[in-house]
Image (cartoon, grey):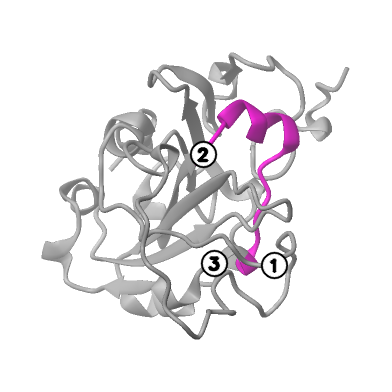
């Protein structure tokens, strides 16, 4: 399948589609900002169970930020790659993530909440249509030092072979492997778009061509767009 058909409108299949909500997150922990380490976002669990409270509104409903990663960001066909990773983010304030940068590492992964789905029939129809047979799912959470988390996310890595998913590591991802990224405002209107195969179609309705930090793939200072 051509990627122009399946991914250019990420919002149609992912940002604009409800899927299983991530479990409620307990951010009441003395955690530092995520750094590369062997720790994870749920490594320190309270010995006594806490009552589950309803998640805040920003953690529910539609995702408002999505990034598609490929081993080769400029691939034109999924037949040419072994996996496809889709990061779907519930962001509390997308413009704030633009201004401050969107940063995360393996330390943000809630390892106890990850799982595999190895039966093709149980995958979403859109994933099967893209030729995938299995998926590995990760849950991620912002570990804000100030106690004000800005996002939660689900990372789905699709492949044709379970062995590919078993060998996959979150650290294999990089901003240079971002094939497509889009974001929307509170009304669901597009405010950000990047596509590796159509750089001329990139836009940012909030900060124009201001370089963005972290996992935002465009624009970067290295692209010569700094003021």
Disc 1 is placed on an element classified as loop
Q: Is residue 118 left or right of residue 201?
A: left
Residue that label 1 marks? 30
The residue at the point 24 percent across, 51 percent down is: 127
Q: Which residues are magenta?
A: 91-107
- Quarter of the image that includes the C terminus: top right
The residue at the point 57 percent across, 21 percent down is: 202
Residue that label 2 marks? 91
Residue that label 3 marks? 109
Q: Is residue 90 above or below residue 10?
A: below
Looking at marks 3 and 1 on the same chain, the residue that comes earlier in the sequence is marked by 1
Of residues 58 and 176, the one drawn nearer to the viewer in this rendering: 58
Residue 58 in picture, x, y percent from top left: 44, 38
Q: Is residue 76 left or right of residue 199?
A: left
The residue at the point 21 percent across, 45 percent down is: 126
Q: Is residue 81 visible?
A: no
């Amino acid at each position: 399948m051509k990627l122009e058909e399946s991914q250019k409108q990420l919002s149609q299949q992912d940002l604009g589609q409800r899927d299983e909500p991530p479990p409620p997150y307990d951010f009441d922990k003395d955690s530092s900002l995520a750094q590369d380490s062997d720790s994870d976002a749920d490594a320190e669990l309270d010995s006594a169970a806490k009552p589950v409270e309803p998640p805040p509104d920003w953690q529910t409903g539609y995702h408002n930020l999505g990034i598609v990663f490929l081993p080769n960001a400029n691939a034109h066909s999924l037949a040419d790659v072994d996996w496809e990773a889709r990061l779907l983010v519930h962001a509390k304030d997308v413009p704030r993530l633009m201004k401050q940068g969107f940063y995360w590492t393996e330390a943000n992964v809630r390892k106890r909440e990850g799982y595999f789905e190895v039966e093709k029939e149980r995958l979403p129809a859109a994933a099967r249509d893209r030729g995938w047979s299995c998926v590995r799912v990760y849950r991620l959470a912002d570990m804000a030092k100030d106690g004000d988390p800005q996002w939660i996310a689900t990372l789905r890595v699709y492949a044709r072979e379970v062995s590919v998913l078993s060998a996959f590591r979150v650290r294999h991802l990089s901003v240079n492997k971002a094939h497509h990224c889009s974001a929307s405002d509170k009304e669901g209107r597009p405010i950000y778009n990047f596509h590796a195969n159509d750089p001329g179609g990139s836009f940012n309705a909030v900060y124009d061509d201001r370089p963005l930090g972290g996992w935002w793939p465009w624009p970067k200072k290295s692209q010569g767009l700094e003021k």
